[in-house]
Amino acid sequence: MDLLDYAFMQRALIAAALVGITAPAIGTYLVQRRQAIMGDGIGHVAMTGVALGFLLNTSPVWMATLVAVIGAVGMELIRSRGRTSGDIALAMLFYGGMAGGVMIINLAPGGSTANLTSYLFGSITTVSAEDTITAVVLAVFVIAVTVGLRRQLFAICQDEEFARVTGLPVRFLNLLLAVTAAVTVTVAMRIVGLLLVSAMMVIPVAAAQRVTRGFAATLSLSMLIGVLVSLSGTAATYYVNAPSGGAIVLLAIAVFVVMTAASTPLARRRAKAARADEEVCTRDDVRV
């Protein structure tokens, strides 16, 4: 039977497409402000939320969203107030979130540890109809923020002081960016997994940057790459019975390698064209 004949694969492919769009969308801003590792920190905090969901017998996805948002906001407040560096705040999220998740999951009913694995590494067979609806709702929010406010978010990622001088609500936008990153993690965790979600925020963006020059072009191409590798990786795991997160990330790395190889001659041509233009300008100056 074709993979689309199965309802669970239909749900998984929808979720994968949403991951491919949202993760690179928010990742473009995080890479721009040199916080590419932020997704990992939030992912570890979300692990505590998933464990709480099992313990309290509530939705692990919504509980992970709540805990991840609280953690991301806390990290951003610490960073903005200058009480400690962003790296230390991220380290606290990493280890505190993971330790909390490990401790809480041991208190949950039997079988929860096995279920937690699907959240850590992704699993196409566990994407329920409720998970799909939740992912759609959260993805709409992420897309609305990252695309609708792209000019404002780009401004604060480039230069916060200049953005503040121009009258932008920098504190609010920074918090909104942190919340959006947290929401993106929970959108992606059922397909990519909490431990690999940061890769989908970074690798498609890095690949796009190899062949693009402007922010808008990088944002668009990274989202396209994200969708392609997410759908391809999810479909591949249907046939090989492997964790979807690993397949998706490996495909993203392969695209990065190809883009890097393609960018070398492109960069040479650009450099050659730039030298030619410079020589023309020099000759014109001499004539004058």
Image: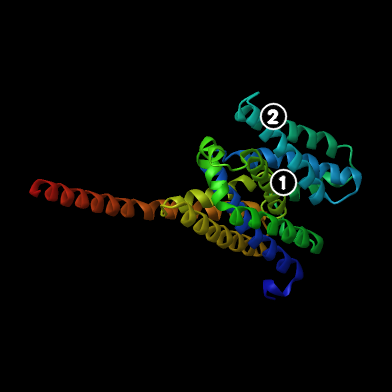
Counting other residues with Cα less than 10 Å from the Cα at mark 1, is it few (<14), some (14-19), or many (20 or more)? Answer: many
Q: Describe the colour scheme in one phrase.
A: rainbow
Residue flagged by tag 2: what amino acid is it? Met
Name which residue lies at 63% across and 31% down.
80
Q: Nearer the viewer, residue 216 or 257?
A: 216
Q: SS for tag 1?
A: helix
Q: SS for tag 2?
A: helix
Q: Is residue 265 visible?
A: yes
Q: Earlier in the sequence, mark 2 or mark 1?
A: 2
Q: Is residue 124 above or below residue 112?
A: below
**Residue found farthest to the left:** 287
Q: Position of residue 97 (x, y in %)?
A: 74, 35
Q: CA distance from mark 2 to mark 1?
A: 19 Å
Q: Is residue 91 visible?
A: no
**Looking at the rendering, which quadrant does residue 130 occupy?**
bottom right
Name which residue lies at 67% across and 75% down.
2
Q: Is residue 65 above or below residue 255?
A: above
Quadrant location of the N terminus?
bottom right
Identify the disc placed on residue 120. Answer: 1
Which mark is nearer the camera, 2 or 1?
A: 2
Name which residue lies at 21% across and 52% down.
277
Q: Nearer the viewer, residue 190 or 280?
A: 280
Residue flagged by tag 1: what amino acid is it? Leu
Whether residue 81 sits left or right of residue 62 in the image: it is left
Name which residue lies at 63% across and 25% down.
82
Counting every numbered tag in the picture gives 2
Identify the disc placed on residue 92. Answer: 2
Whether residue 36 sits left or right of residue 97 in the image: it is left
Q: Position of residue 168 (x, y in %)?
A: 59, 43
